[in-house]
Image (tube, helix red, strand yellow):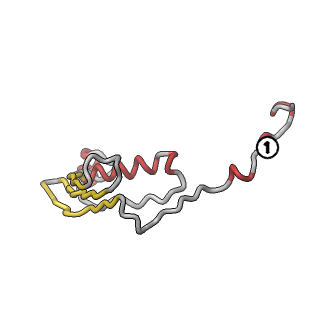
């Protein structure tokens, strides 16, 4: 067997099947997990949303529940999904739009300097 030092190219051993894209079929009519995000509520400098979930999946403790989430949590989730190799190549929708006290990626001090005349 030749090694890379001997001048061989290990990429020649890669099979075509390992280069194929993964494809998942999704039934868009499936109602086993339905999530609805509504009721945007502005409280001082935060925007909060109500996340309603209905499911028939046994992994959940209740078939219906609602939670309140801040806009920053959706930004965190979006960024975590984009950075995860598990979701590489998948379409990740943009985060919900909302007002935050500090623009994304900026500290409040740099924001104040940017607004100063």
Q: Which residue is drawn at 13% across and 55% down?
A: 43
Q: Residue at x 24, y 58 (%)?
A: 52
* Mark 1 secondary-structure assignment: helix
Outermost bottom residue: 29
Q: Which residue is drawn at 44% across and 58% down?
A: 92
In the image, 46 versus 89, the foreground residue is 89
Q: Residue at x 69, y 49 (%)?
A: 18
Outermost left residue: 44
Image height of 95 relative to 86, above or below: below
Relative to 17, 44 lies left or right: left
Relative to 18, 76 lies left or right: left
The residue carrying mark 1 is 13
Quarter of image, res 56: bottom left
Image height of 97 relative to 105, above or below: below
In the image, 74 versus 65, the foreground residue is 65
Q: Position of residue 80 (x, y in %)?
A: 41, 46
- For the N terminus, which image quadrant? top right
Picture mark count: 1
Relative to 9, 105 lies left or right: left
Residues packed near mark 1 inside 10 Å, few (<14), some (14 to 19) or many (20 plus) = few
- For the C terminus, which image quadrant? bottom left
Q: Where is residue 62 in the image (x, y as percent from the top left)?
A: 25, 50
In the image, 91 versus 16, the foreground residue is 16
Q: Position of residue 46 (x, y in %)?
A: 19, 53
């Amino acid at each position: 067997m030749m090694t890379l030092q001997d001048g061989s190219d290990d990429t020649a051993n890669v099979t075509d099947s390992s280069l194929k894209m993964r494809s998942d079929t999704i039934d868009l009519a499936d109602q086993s997990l339905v999530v609805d995000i509504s009721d945007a509520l502005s409280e001082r400098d935060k925007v909060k949303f109500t996340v309603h979930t209905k499911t028939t999946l046994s992994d959940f403790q209740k078939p219906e529940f609602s939670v309140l989430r801040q806009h920053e949590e959706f930004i965190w989730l979006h960024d975590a999904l984009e950075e995860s190799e598990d979701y590489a190549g998948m379409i990740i929708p943009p985060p919900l739009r909302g007002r935050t006290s500090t623009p994304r990626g900026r500290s409040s001090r740099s924001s104040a300097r940017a607004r100063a005349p």
